[in-house]
Amino acid sequence: MGLRWRLRAATGPLHAEADALGSAHDLGAPAGHAAFLRAHARALPGLEAAIGAALGDAAWLRWQERRRLPALQADLAALGEPAPAPLPATLPGADAEAEALGAAYVLEGSRLGNAMLRRGLPETAPAAYLAHQPGAEAGGWPGFLAGLEAALPDQARWPAAEAGARTAFETFLAALRTEA
């Protein structure tokens, strides 16, 4: 079983709860769309900053291309919504690289769900955040998974990656509960 499957198994209940809370927002209604974006605007800044601080020079990751905060802020502005105060997101322990990769796994995986949620938006709704994809050079989800496995071949580091993934989900859950 590879790291990707370990992360999926370790975060399954958190992922299910985040999906349930996130999908409770009616993205077809401006108020529901705004609440969804506000929740993500609470969680994303701290997580992106923590990941960038730990992995910023990992060339395979192309973190600057993967960052979605500017797209999220543009969508909030288009809806006339101020950005809420972000939640702090501190990765928990001593293996910053592994923890950041675990958190990045959550953020990158959320692109798949965002693509499905985008289908529920009216055509005129701002969709930069839900539609955001890194450049082709970043390799999308398959490229991320390949890089993740290559970056953490030592299974002794996988618990740190799991901790980072749990931190990312817990940050999103706290934000989604605020907007529930």
Image (cartoon, grey):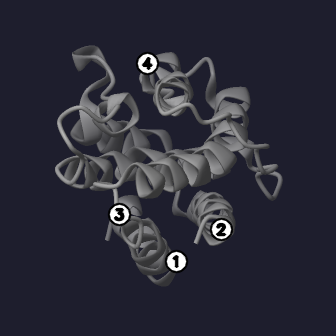
Dot 2: element: helix
Q: Is residue 97 left or right of residue 21?
A: right
Residue 14 is labelled as 1
Q: On the rendered image, what quadrant is the N terminus found in?
A: bottom left
Element assignment for label 3: loop
Q: Amino acid at mark 1?
A: Leu
Q: Is residue 98 among the parts visible in the rendering? A: no
User: Which residue lies under the disc numbered 3?
Assistant: 26
Label 4 Cα crowd, 10 Å radius (few <14 / some 14-19 / many 20+)? some
First reached walking from the N terminus: tag 4 or tag 3: 3
Report the residue marked by disc 2: 170
Q: Which residue is mark 4?
A: 65
Q: Residue at image x 40%, y 71%?
A: 19
Disc 4 or 2, which lies upstream in sequence? 4
Could you tell me if the residues under marks 1 and 2 are in contact, i.e. CB atoms within 8 Å?
A: yes
Disc 4 + disc 2, Cβ < 8 Å: no
Image quadrant in which you'd find residue 55: top right
Q: Is residue 164 above or below residue 178?
A: above
The CA distance from mark 2 to mark 3 is 22 Å
The residue that appears at 53% across and 55% down in the rendered structure is 35
